[in-house]
Amino acid sequence: MSQGVLVEIVNGWAHITFTNPVLRGPALNRLLALGAPIKSTTGRNNTHSYRVPQQYLKDAGLLDTPHQHKLFPVAKLATPTRAVGVSRPAKGRVILFVFAGRRANMELQLPYIERILAENPQVEYHVWDLARWDNDSKFLRSIQTPRTQVRTEFAKLIPGFDHVYRHYCHPQYNDAVFVKLDDDIVFLQTERFGDFVRAVQDHPHGVMSAHVINNGACASVEPALFAQFSRLGISRLDVHTSAAFASLSHNYFFRHYPRILDVPVEVLAPTPEWLSINVIGYTWEMGRRIAALTGTAYGTKRNPRIVAGRAQTILGDEGAVNTLTRHVVNGFTACHLTFGPQDPGNTQLQRWRQRYAQMAEYALARELVPEPVT
């Protein structure tokens, strides 16, 4: 049993026990990528096992021959860049803030936030209540995670985003790095959060983006995904209207999740593409530039100015960011559920949410082993 995984077959069901916890996440995520239903059970001495239908085991690399006890073949797993369960805390003050609204999305995001806060004691979490509906707002105001502020002063304002950026221009924040999230970020690679913050600190004159699944500028980070996207016959400027692109992106992530999350952290060359700002990081000085540009005239209707391929007359926050230097940080992955105009339908949204909820259960199951701060 020294190789780390015990698989026992009983009446067509596989009972999987991980004696080496490092192997648990990659193995379970292979099963999830195959669509396997997984049930977690707790046995004696608080040992955890996982029950799945037997037919999924071989394709997941957990069983070579049916009806045998078999150990997990370690060689079939990608070697982690850094041991699973090891985190590198960010240094310096960090404001992690979210433009919050939809409860169904926030419930998926909050477990990742709790993990980031647990691993990074200098991070503050600011929830900006910009909900359209009272029930969502009520939920947001009930959030009570540590070092969390639920901010309501710009609730119901349109656009509330502009006011938030200007709020953070106050000198009380001049020692902070900022990480901004959309509320429909439903997966975050939490153990790489510190690396992302370091990338922001090391590139103070640019805006950093996570490698975001379902994001046009990030599509080319994965060549195989980009090849599939190219066959859709749409421009990267139009992916925010394409349900097909959203489906392609999420399904690609579900299939290739273990490999994607094993990629080393790397700040890529500045992108010329329009960057949707689903997960971005920047310094206080860069935030002041974003705030100054947001809401300003930028050309006219007769003579708009072109920013990253888009005609602009009044800059929103995203337009403002796209006038600046933009980098994608590969190796820090986030999943963006949907752009409004993609409109995949409630049934499909619910399927994706259920899948990401399953993934969170296992992605966050590892024990915290923080790397020493030097």
Image: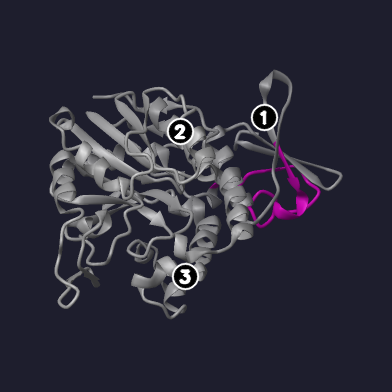
Q: Compare residues 350 and 50 and report the one nearer the observer.
A: 350
Whether residue 131 appears in this view of the structure is yes
Q: Compare residues 254 and 232 and report the one nearer the observer.
A: 232
The residues bearing labels 2 and 3 have C-alpha atoms spaced at a distance of 36 Å
SS category of the residue bearing label 1: strand
Q: Magenta segment, which residues?
A: 50-74
Q: Amino acid at mark 3?
A: Ser
Q: Residues within 10 Å of mark 1 (few under 14, many from 20)?
A: some
Q: Nearer the viewer, mark 2 or mark 3?
A: 3
Residue 252 painted magenta: no
Looking at the image, do the residues carrying marks 1 and 2 touch, with CB atoms under 8 Å apart?
no
Q: Quadrant of residue 328?
A: bottom left
Quarter holding the N terminus is top right
Residue occupying the point 33% across, 49% down = 158
Whether residue 27 appears in this view of the structure is no
| 259 versus 52 height, above or below | below
Q: Amino acid at mark 2?
A: Gly
Residue occupying the point 15% across, 54% down = 293
Q: Amino acid at mark 1?
A: His
Report which residue position mark 3 lands on.
242
The residues bearing labels 1 and 3 have C-alpha atoms spaced at a distance of 41 Å
Residue 71 painted magenta: yes
Q: Residues within 10 Å of mark 3 (few under 14, many from 20)?
A: some
Q: Earlier in the sequence, mark 2 or mark 3?
A: 2
Q: Main secondary structure of the magenta part?
A: loop
- Residue 48 badge: 1
SS category of the residue bearing label 3: loop
Looking at the image, do the residues carrying marks 2 and 3 touch, with CB atoms under 8 Å apart?
no
Q: Compare residues 15 and 225 and report the one nearer the observer.
A: 225
